[in-house]
Amino acid sequence: MLFGKTIVVTGCASGIGARAAELLGQLGADVMGIDRREPKFAMAAFVQGDLSAPEGVASLAARLPHKFDALCNVAGVSGTLGAVKSLAINFYGLRALSEACAAKLREGGAVVNVASIAGFGWRQNLERAKGLAGIQGFPHVETVVEEFRIKDEEVYPVSKEALLLWTFRAAHLPLFKDRGIRVNAVSPGPVETPILAEFRSVLGDERVDSDITRVGRAGNAGDIAPVIAFLCSDGARWVNGVNVAADGGLEASILAEVMGF
């Protein structure tokens, strides 16, 4: 279902991004990777760049192919870089790249955003998420962090809440919808990647261990990559504006607890 497609993957040098890029290539796609560091395996093409500032996003968008089939927004940071840098990369840079690439995506193409179970609280924090997602363009992120009083230790879930809300909105924005471009998200639970140790320092061992205990084991990059591949494929042509919880049942467990069923 991916043979002959050209797919761009951000964060391709490690973790979920690396496994997704590898699997997409194995399934027949020509993969173009984006990362600050060069990947350790061969792809059709690689572009080095940074999503944390508008000029970096503009440079990346200009170097991408004139036409491609899917954009996989996997690049993200845990929050250890601080609220400003983390929000810039995890949300505003991701969104800016997606919007800049909309005209380059073929009709019927796809945008796949890697969110997180950490964004589960978007409903409870709806007004904040709406406020963050409602800011147009790539803002001065330091001002945004000050306005919304976002602390370093909470920026990761905050960024993922905004990303999920934007995913639902973007599926119906003319920029994407008028050309049949689907916009979906994947929300992993705890995954054994190099960034997991950073999540422990940001979210705390108790939170991470509790989540793992709920589902029996931590996930791995190979558990998430096939979901990304499916959302890029023609098999998902009627899937739009959806968040897929690839978390071993963690969201279901939390929902049951929160809603009392």
Image (cartoon, grey):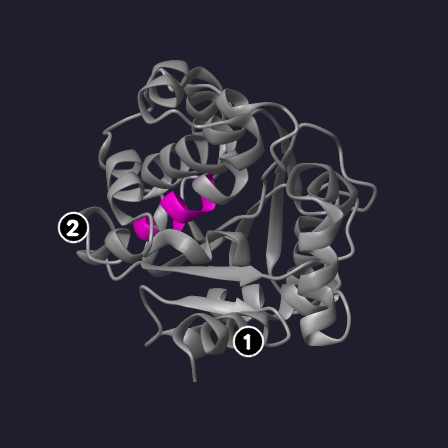
Decide whether residue 163 is among the magenta residues. yes
Residue at the image point whose x is 23% and y is 29% from the top: 136
Q: CA distance from mark 2 to mark 1?
A: 36 Å
Q: Which residue is mark 2?
A: 174
- Mark 2 residue crowding within 10 angstroms, few (<14) / some (14–19) / many (20+): few
User: Height in image: 142 above or below 176?
Assistant: above
Q: Which residue is mark 1?
A: 253
User: Height in image: 207 above or below 134?
Assistant: below
In this view of the protein, can residue 63 be seen by the observer? no
- In-image side of 101 versus 248 (left or right): left
**Which quadrant of the rendered structure holds the C terminus?**
bottom left
Decide whether residue 95 is among the magenta residues. no
Q: Which circle marks residue 45 in the picture?
A: none
- In-image side of 84 versus 35 (left or right): left
Find the magenta span and give its range. Answer: 159-166
The kind of secondary structure element at disc 1 is helix
- Mark 1 residue crowding within 10 angstroms, few (<14) / some (14–19) / many (20+): some
In this view of the protein, can residue 136 be seen by the observer? yes
Query: Whole-percent x and y of residue 8?
Result: 54, 47
Of all residues shown, which one is farthest toward the front? 260
Residue at the image point whose x is 75% and y is 44% from the top: 14
Query: Whole-percent x and y of residue 54?
Result: 41, 19
- Secondary structure, magenta segment, majority class: helix
- In-image side of 161 versus 225 (left or right): left
In which quadrant of the rendered view does residue 34 lie? top right
Q: Nearer the viewer, residue 198 or 242?
A: 198
Query: Whole-percent x and y of residue 115?
Result: 50, 52
